[in-house]
C-alpha cells in the first residue's frame, strides 16, 4: 500500500510540476507554395520527434515540455534549414520559409532512421521484428521468430506443444521471454507465444547474448521482449483462420479513445484449437504383435489436442498531462493440452493423459515522459494474480500407435502395473501459484549526450502442490515451494562525436531466495508424535556487468560490439520440478554464468536506383560455467519419460550469423540469414558437442507485391519461405565408441512454405492462404520428436482504423 500511495502522490504532483504546450505552424517556399511532405526533426533536452507537413504545408506538435528546441527542416526542393524556438506558453506558432530550388533532388539528401534501425545500431546484437504483415497471414508468433537470424525455435510437435528458444546456441531458460518487460512465466503456460496472436503484438525485440539494463532479469543467453500494441488511436481488428488438423484460431482486439478526456478502453480476445492429429512415422512408431514382433507403421497422433482461450481488458488514460499511458486491467486465460508421449516418442504412446492450466492476473501500466521535471521518464508495469495447473493421468490401459489397446507377446491386452500412462502412479496433481511481478524504470537525460537509467524487477511465486488421489493425510504432508527474485540494474548512456558514437555501460545485481517447506512427523522428548515443518531456505546473490558500443564508421557502415558477464539463476521448474512437463526436482542445482562477447557490422541501407539492401553480421563467443540443461545422455542412460535439469559443466559456444535484406521498388523483397556455431562442454573430462542442438541453420524468404491486379487500389502479396537445419544428434556418443550412433542422428531437414494475401480496395479486409511444408518432408526437433507435415490454412482479417 505504501508504494501505491507514493505512486498516487507522484501522479498528482506531476500535474503541478510538468508544464506542456503545443508547437504549430506552416512551412512554405519563397514562391509562396506550401512545402508538402517536408520532413521536420525536433530536438531538445531529452526530447526527440520526427514529423512531416500535410498537403497544406502545416504541422502540429502536441504535449511538448516547456523549453528550447531546434527545428531542422528538409525538403526535396530546398536546402535544409534549422531554427531554434522556445516554448513557454500553451501554444507557439512557428512559420518557415524555404528557398525553393528547382530539381534539387540531386543536391539534397534526407536520411532518417526508423525506430527499429535505431535499436539495431545501439551496439547490442539485437533484431527488431515487426508483426504488422505477419498478423495478416497464418503465421504464429513462434514461426515469425524462427525466421530471425541466430534464433532457432525448438518445438515438440504441433500447436500448443512445449517450445524451447535457442539464441546463438544458448537455449532453454538461458533465454528469457518478456511481455512488455514482465517475465512471461508470470502469466503461465496459457498466455504465451503459443497463444498470443501476432495482431496483439506491436513488435518483438530479440537480444542475443548481451541484454540491456532496462530488461533487468537473469537472461544468460539473451532475451525476447514482446511489446504489445500501445497505439492510442481508435481501432478494431478481428481475424479467423482454419486449416489442417482441424486447426481454428480467432482473435479480436480493439481500442477506443475519447478525444477530449483521453479516457481509453482497450480489450483483446483469442481462441485457439487444434486436433494436432498429423501423421508420424519412424523407429518408435510401431505396432507390437504376437511374439513381440514390431511392425513399423505411419500413424496419426490421437492424444495431442490443444485448446487455449483468453483475453485482456484495460481502462485508463492516454496522452494526458499527467500520463502518456495509465492503464489498470485484467488478463485471463486457460488451456487444455493432451499429452501423446513423454520426453521421447516411445513405442507405447499415452492416451487420456492431459494437462489443464489457467491464469487470472490484474495489471498496472504507467508511463510518463518528463515526469515531475524535464528529462525524467518513469515506466511502471506490474501484475498480481493466480495461475494453476492440473495433471490428469488415471488410465492404466496401454496403447499402441494405431490407437488401439497394446498387446503383449501372447496377444493379450495389458495394463501398466503402476496404474497410469506415465510411471509413478495415477495422479490428479494440482499446482496452485500466487504470482506477483513489478518492473520499475527511471531514466534521466542530463542533456543530449548523457543519460542515466535505473531499473528494478521483482518477481515472486508462492506454490502449493496437492493431489486429489492422495489421502487426506498425504495431502496434509504436501509441502509448499516459494521463489522470490529481485534484480537491479544501473545504466549510463553516452552519445558523442556528432551522434556517431553510442555507448551503453551497465551493472546488474541478482538476488534470489527459494523456500521449501515440508511437514513431517517427529517424536518429541515426551515420546509424542507431532507435525513440524522442515524448512529449506536458499539465498543466492550474484553481480554482473557489461557494455554495448556502436560507432558509425561511415553513414552506411556501423561497428557494433558488446560484452556481458551474465548470470542465470535456476527457475522454479528446475529447482522444484513439474509433473506436467515430466520434470523431476533438483534442489541442489547451481546458477549458471557466462561471459558473452559480440562483434558485428551493419552495412546499409544502400540505395541504388530502386534497389536497396542491408547486410548485418555478428561474431560471438560464450564462455559458460555450470551450464544448466538436460543430462548429457547416451544410449545407455536415456530415460524415455522423465527429465531433470542439471549443471552439465563448463563449455564454450562460438560462431557467427549474418543477414541480408533486399528490396526492389517496394514490390520485391528478399531476406536470407545463416547461423553456424560450435557448442562444446566437458563431460567426464572429455570435451563433446552438446547433444540435441542444431549447429547450422539457414532461412530465406521472398515476397512480391502486385498492385491493382484484380481491382483498383487492391494488393496481392506472394510469399515463399525456406528453412534448412543441418543434421545433429540428440544423444551424446558413449566415450570413444561411436558405433551405432547413426541411430540417434536427426537427419538434415529442408522445409518450404508458400503463401499469398489479398488486400481488398477498402484496405479493411485481407484474405490469406498458406501452405506449410509444401513437399511434406519429415521435420523433427527436440529429442527427435516429429513435427507436422504438409498443412493448409485460410485466414480472413478485418480492420477498422477509425469509426
Image (cartoon, rainbow, N blue to C red):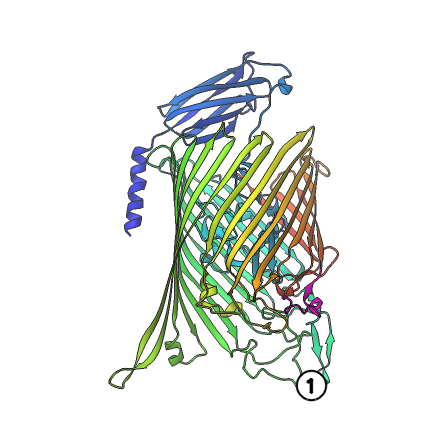
Q: Residues within 10 Å of mark 1 (few under 14, many from 20)?
A: few
Q: Is residue 356 above or below residue 176?
A: below
Q: In this figure, which residue is indicated by the disc labeled 1?
A: 409
Q: Residue 230 at what x, y percent from top left?
A: 48, 43
Q: Residue 246 at what x, y percent from top left?
A: 64, 61
* Left or right relative to 660: residue 238: left
Q: Assess whether residue 583 is covered by the magenta stretch.
A: no
Q: Residue at point 29% right, 34% down?
A: 16
Q: Residue at point 38% right, 80% down?
A: 473
Specify the farthest residue to the right: 775
Specify the farthest residue to the left: 526
* Left or right relative to 430: residue 691: right
User: Of 281 and 560, which appears nearest the observer?
Assistant: 560
Query: What element does badge 1 sit on?
Result: loop
User: Of 244 and 601, which appears nearest the observer?
Assistant: 601
Q: How many marks?
A: 1
Q: Residue at point 57% right, 68% down?
A: 338
Q: Residue 75 at what x, y percent from top left?
A: 57, 21
- Region rendered in magenta: 732-747
Splitting the image into 4 quarters, where does residue 569 fall?
bottom left
Q: Is residue 5 above or below residue 420?
A: above
Q: Is residue 366 above or below residue 337?
A: above
Amino acid at each position: 500500500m505504501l508504494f501505491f500511495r507514493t505512486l498516487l502522490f507522484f501522479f498528482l504532483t506531476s500535474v503541478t510540476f510538468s508544464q506542456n504546450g503545443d508547437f504549430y505552424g506552416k512551412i512554405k517556399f519563397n514562391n509562396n507554395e506550401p512545402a508538402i511532405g517536408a520532413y521536420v526533426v525536433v530536438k531538445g533536452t531529452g526530447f526527440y520527434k520526427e514529423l512531416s507537413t500535410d498537403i497544406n504545408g502545416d504541422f502540429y506538435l502536441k504535449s511538448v515540455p516547456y523549453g528550447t528546441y531546434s527545428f531542422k527542416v528538409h525538403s526535396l526542393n530546398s536546402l535544409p534549414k534549422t531554427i531554434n524556438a522556445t516554448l513557454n506558453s500553451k501554444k507557439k506558432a512557428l512559420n518557415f520559409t524555404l528557398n525553393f530550388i528547382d530539381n534539387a533532388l540531386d543536391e539534397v539528401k534526407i536520411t532518417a532512421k526508423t525506430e527499429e534501425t535505431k535499436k539495431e545500431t545501439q551496439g547490442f546484437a539485437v533484431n527488431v521484428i515487426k508483426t504488422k504483415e505477419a498478423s495478416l497471414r497464418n503465421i504464429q508468433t513462434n514461426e515469425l521468430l524462427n525466421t530471425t537470424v541466430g534464433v532457432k525455435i525448438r518445438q515438440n510437435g504441433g500447436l500448443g506443444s512445449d517450445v524451447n528458444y535457442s539464441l546463438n546456441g544458448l537455449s532453454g531458460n538461458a533465454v528469457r521471454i518478456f511481455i512488455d518487460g514482465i517475465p512471461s512465466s508470470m502469466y503461465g503456460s496459457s498466455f504465451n507465444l503459443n497463444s498470443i496472436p501476432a495482431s496483439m503484438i506491436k513488435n518483438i525485440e530479440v537480444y542475443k547474448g548481451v541484454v540491456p539494463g532496462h530488461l533487468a532479469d537473469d537472461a544468460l543467453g539473451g532475451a525476447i521482449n514482446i511489446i504489445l500494441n500501445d497505439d492510442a488511436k481508435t481501432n478494431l481488428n478481428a481475424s479467423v483462420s482454419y486449416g489442417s488438423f482441424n486447426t481454428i484460431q480467432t482473435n479480436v482486439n480493439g481500442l477506443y479513445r475519447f478525444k477530449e478526456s483521453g479516457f481509453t478502453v482497450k480489450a483483446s480476445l483469442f481462441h485457439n484449437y487444434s486436433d494436432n492429429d498429423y501423421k508420424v512415422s519412424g523407429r518408435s512408431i510401431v505396432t507390437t504383435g504376437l511374439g513381440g514382433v514390431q511392425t513399423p507403421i505411419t500413424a496419426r497422433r490421437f492424444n495431442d489436442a490443444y485448446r487455449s482461450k483468453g483475453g485482456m481488458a484495460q481502462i485508463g488514460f492516454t496522452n494526458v498531462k499527467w500520463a502518456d499511458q495509465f492503464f489498470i486491467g485484467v488478463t485471463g486465460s486457460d488451456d487444455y493440452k493432451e499429452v501423446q508421449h513423454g520426453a521421447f516418442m516411445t513405442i507405447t504412446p499415452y492416451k487420456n493423459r492431459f494437462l489443464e492450466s489457467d491464469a487470472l492476473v490484474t495489471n498496472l501500466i504507467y508511463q510518463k515522459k518528463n515526469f515531475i521535471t524535464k528529462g525524467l521518464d518513469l515506466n511502471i508495469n506490474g501484475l498480481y494474480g493466480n495461475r494453476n495447473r492440473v495433471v490428469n493421468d488415471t488410465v492404466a490401459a496401454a496403447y499402441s500407435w494405431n490407437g488401439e489397446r497394446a498387446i503383449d507377446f501372447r496377444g493379450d491386452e495389458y495394463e501398466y502395473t503402476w496404474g497410469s500412462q506415465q510411471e509413478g502412479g495415477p495422479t490428479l496433481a494440482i499446482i496452485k501459484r500466487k504470482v506477483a511481478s513489478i518492473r520499475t524504470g527511471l531514466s534521466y537525460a542530463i542533456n543530449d549526450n548523457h543519460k542515466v537509467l535505473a531499473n528494478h524487477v521483482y518477481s515472486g511465486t508462492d506454490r502449493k502442490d496437492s493431489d486429489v488421489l492422495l489421502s487426506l493425510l498425504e495431502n496434509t504432508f504436501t509441502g509448499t515451494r516459494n521463489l522470490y527474485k529481485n534484480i537491479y540494474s544501473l545504466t549510463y548512456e553516452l552519445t558523442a562525436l556528432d551522434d556517431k558514437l553510442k555507448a551503453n555501460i551497465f551493472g546488474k545485481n541478482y538476488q534470489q531466495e527459494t523456500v521449501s517447506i515440508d511437514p513431517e512427523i517427529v517424536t518429541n522428548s515426551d515420546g509424542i508424535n507431532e507435525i513440524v515443518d522442515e524448512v529449506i531456505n536458499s539465498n543466492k546473490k550474484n553481480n554482473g556487468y557489461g557494455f554495448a558500443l556502436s560507432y558509425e564508421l561511415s553513414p552506411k557502415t556501423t561497428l557494433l560490439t558488446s560484452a556481458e558477464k551474465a548470470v542465470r539463476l535456476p527457475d522454479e521448474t528446475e529447482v522444484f520440478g513439474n509433473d506436467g512437463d515430466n520434470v523431476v526436482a533438483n534442489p541442489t542445482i547451481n546458477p549458471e554464468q557466462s561471459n558473452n562477447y559480440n562483434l558485428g557490422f551493419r552495412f546499409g541501407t544502400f540505395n541504388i536506383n530502386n534497389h536497396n539492401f542491408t547486410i548485418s553480421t555478428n561474431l560471438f563467443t560464450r564462455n559458460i560455467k555450470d551450464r544448466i540443461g538436460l543430462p548429457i545422455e547416451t544410449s545407455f542412460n536415456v530415460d524415455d519419460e522423465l527429465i531433470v535439469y542439471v549443471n552439465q559443466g563448463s563449455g564454450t559456444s562460438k560462431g557467427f550469423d549474418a543477414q541480408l535484406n533486399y528490396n526492389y521498388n517496394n514490390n520485391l523483397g528478399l531476406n536470407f540469414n545463416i547461423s553456424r556455431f560450435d557448442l562444446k562442454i566437458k563431460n567426464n573430462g572429455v570435451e563433446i558437442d552438446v547433444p540435441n542442438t542444431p549447429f547450422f541453420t539457414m532461412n530465406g524468404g521472398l515476397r512480391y507485391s502486385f498492385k491493382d491486379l484484380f481491382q483498383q487500389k487492391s494488393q496481392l502479396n506472394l510469399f515463399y519461405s525456406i528453412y534448412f537445419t543441418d543434421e545433429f544428434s540428440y544423444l551424446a556418443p558413449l566415450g570413444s565408441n561411436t558405433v551405432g550412433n547413426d541411430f540417434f542422428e536427426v537427419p538434415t531437414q529442408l522445409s518450404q512454405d508458400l503463401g499469398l494475401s489479398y488486400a481488398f480496395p477498402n484496405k479493411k479486409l485481407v484474405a490469406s492462404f498458406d501452405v506449410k511444408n509444401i513437399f511434406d518432408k519429415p521435420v523433427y526437433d527436440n529429442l527427435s520428436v516429429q513435427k507436422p507435415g504438409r498443412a493448409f490454412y485460410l485466414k480472413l482479417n478485418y480492420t477498422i482504423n477509425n469509426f
